[in-house]
Image: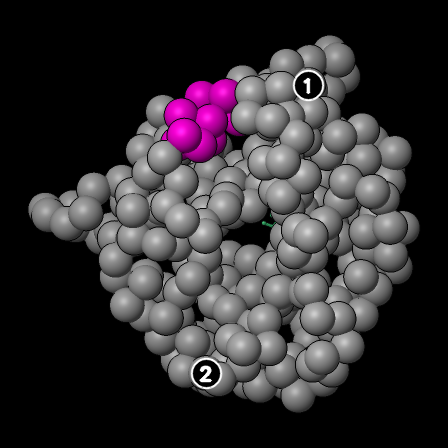
Amino acid sequence: MRKKIIAGNWKMNNSPEDSKNLVRDTMRNISFGKEKNLNVIFCPPFTSLSLVSEIIGHHKENGVFTGGQNCHWEERGAFTGEISASMLKSSGADYVILGHSERRQYFNETDEIISKKIKVALKNHLIPVFCCGEKLLERKDHRHFEIVEKQISLGLFPNFSELPEGIFPVIAYEPVWAIGTGETATPNQAQEMHFFIRSLIAKKFGNGKAASVSILYGGSCNPKNSGELFIQPDIDGGLIGGASLKPEEFIGIINSI
Ligand code: 13P
């Protein structure tokens, strides 16, 4: 059975001290063992990653992990300001968010660059959380399926044939118009896209693979709307931005799954 996952993408927020407080306040209120099939992932900025990984420590056995928010596509070298997949791994991360729309938009990441990043992440035994999603105009033009199919076919699928044993990418559908806007996809809109994504995987790699991929929804998720999203058959959890910075909201979302 595929994993349910709630991941918090803290983006460019929190000093190490703030991170410590946030993760402690959140961890204190997670009731472990309630949902055995659930993974909770904290994705702090690089500067807090080791610290947060240390705090969650032995809770990996309870399904609590850390992840990076990005990595470079090369293993090492003269890339001032960049962080490698192996650096993330050695800072305690088990996951890495790749292809986030903010990286695509502000840092010109193309599907080809994202594919290279996925490759190096997998090589270092990091589970990629691959983000895809259409912009508002693309949805208005009814091109959302076409856009997401292209992102997945070019960014993710080239790496599917050589997955390391026991590692399976996670997909996050994040419609750009719903990120940080307070506007959420309706449960029907999200389910329809998640089903489409799962069908793409089934067509190319078979029903077995399709059934085991966790597909998360992201975009203005909060404790009020998360329950009706997570109850959809193809929505396996959420990638949470703003609400993951508030322990009570993040916990509310975790409890709604
Ligand atoms: P918000 O939850 O703040 O809309 O952000 C979603 C997101 O981008 C998570 O990666």
Cα separation between marks 2 and 1: 40 Å
| 89 relative to 71, above or below | below
Q: Which of the two residues, 17 or 76, is positioned nearer the viewer here?
A: 76
Q: At 55% across and 26% down in the image, what residue appears? A: 205
Taking 134 as reference, is 127 left or right? Answer: left
| Identity, as a three-letter code, of the amino acid under mark 2 | Gly
Provide the secondary structure element on which disc 2 rests.
helix
- Spot occupied by residue 34 in the image (x, y as percentages of width and height): 77, 77
What numbered label is drawn on residue 25? none
Q: Which residue is mark 1?
A: 145
- Spot occupied by residue 64 in the image (x, y as percentages of width and height): 56, 72
| Identity, as a three-letter code, of the amino acid under mark 1 | Phe
Q: At 78% across and 36% down in the image, what residue appears? A: 190
Quick check: can you spot residue 239? yes
Taking 66 as reference, is 82 left or right? Answer: left
Whether residue 76 appears in magenta in the rendering, the answer is: no
- Assign the C terminus to one quadrant of the image: bottom right
- The extreme left residue here reads 78
- Spot occupied by residue 159 in the image (x, y as percentages of width and height): 39, 32
Q: At 37% across and 46% down in the image, what residue appears? A: 164
Residue 87, picture quadrant: bottom left
Q: At 41% across and 30% down in the image, what residue appears? A: 161
| 20 relative to 256, above or below | below
Q: Which residue is mark 2?
A: 57
| 28 relative to 220, above or below | below
Q: Which of the two residues, 84 or 124, is positioned nearer the viewer here?
A: 124
What is the magenta range? 151-161
Please tell me whether the stretch drawn in magenta is mainly helix, strand or loop.
helix
